[in-house]
Image: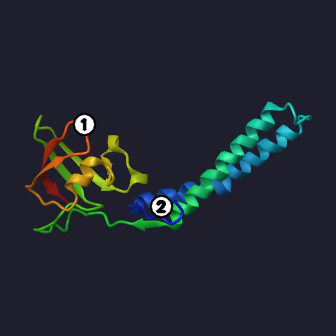
Amino acid sequence: MENDKFYVTQEGYNDLVKEHENLVQNVRQQVIVELQEARAQGDLSENADYDAARDHQAQVEARIRELETMIKNAEIIEESDGKKKKKNAVVKLGSIVTLEDLQDHVENTFSIVGSIEADPLNGKLSNNTPLAEAILDHKVGETVTVTRVEEPYKVKILSIK
């Protein structure tokens, strides 16, 4: 994980930085207060509040380190702005793609993002999913078979922004 690149949009990068700042500036201070209050209760050997505060501190510090690694290794992907429509555009990281499932003829629109930003319920599809891998580097009008799933299926690329 130390040297792996993390693909994120500018918005996703900003969210990582914001979460990191919040953990360092706010949550870390709250944990210190929790530890001080638990220590004030006396005997630490059987103090459940102290144990809980130490566990919370470990989780916060681990997340801070994880975020620092992600921020350090982030590679910001260009998102499509919808205005620059290229005649020969292909699906890539940052593309907004409208697809038609050829089995049930349902249309869906997804942004292709890096794995740490993925949120399929909100239309953000990781570039590591079988669907995204199948459509990457393909053009509007092409029909693509999605493999690496239990039952392969076909989708048609309707638009790329």
Q: Seen in the image, is 95 located left or right of residue 26?
A: left
The label on residue 14 is: 2
In the rendered image, residue 94, in percent from the top left (x then y), is placed at 30, 61
Q: Residues within 10 Å of mark 1 (few under 14, many from 20)?
A: few
Q: Seen in the image, is 119 located left or right of residue 161?
A: right
Q: Seen in the image, is 90 located left or right of residue 12?
A: left
Secondary element at tag 2 = helix
In the rendered image, residue 42, in percent from the top left (x then y), is placed at 92, 35
In the rendered image, residue 91, in percent from the top left (x then y), is placed at 21, 60
Residue on which disc 1 sits: 150
Marks 2 and 1, Cα distance to the nearest angstrom? Answer: 36 Å
The mark nearer the N terminus, 2 or 1, is 2
Q: Nearer the viewer, residue 117 or 73?
A: 73
**Colouring style:** rainbow
Q: Nearer the viewer, residue 66 or 149?
A: 149
Q: Residue furthest right?
A: 42
Q: Residues within 10 Å of mark 2 (few under 14, many from 20)?
A: few
Q: Is residue 128 above or below residue 46?
A: below
Q: Nearer the viewer, residue 63 or 81?
A: 63
Say what amino acid the circle numbered 1 marks: Glu
Name the residue rendered at 17%, 58% in the picture: 160
Q: Seen in the image, is 132 located left or right of residue 69?
A: left
Name the residue rendered at 75%, 40% in the picture: 53
Q: Quadrant of the C terminus?
A: bottom left
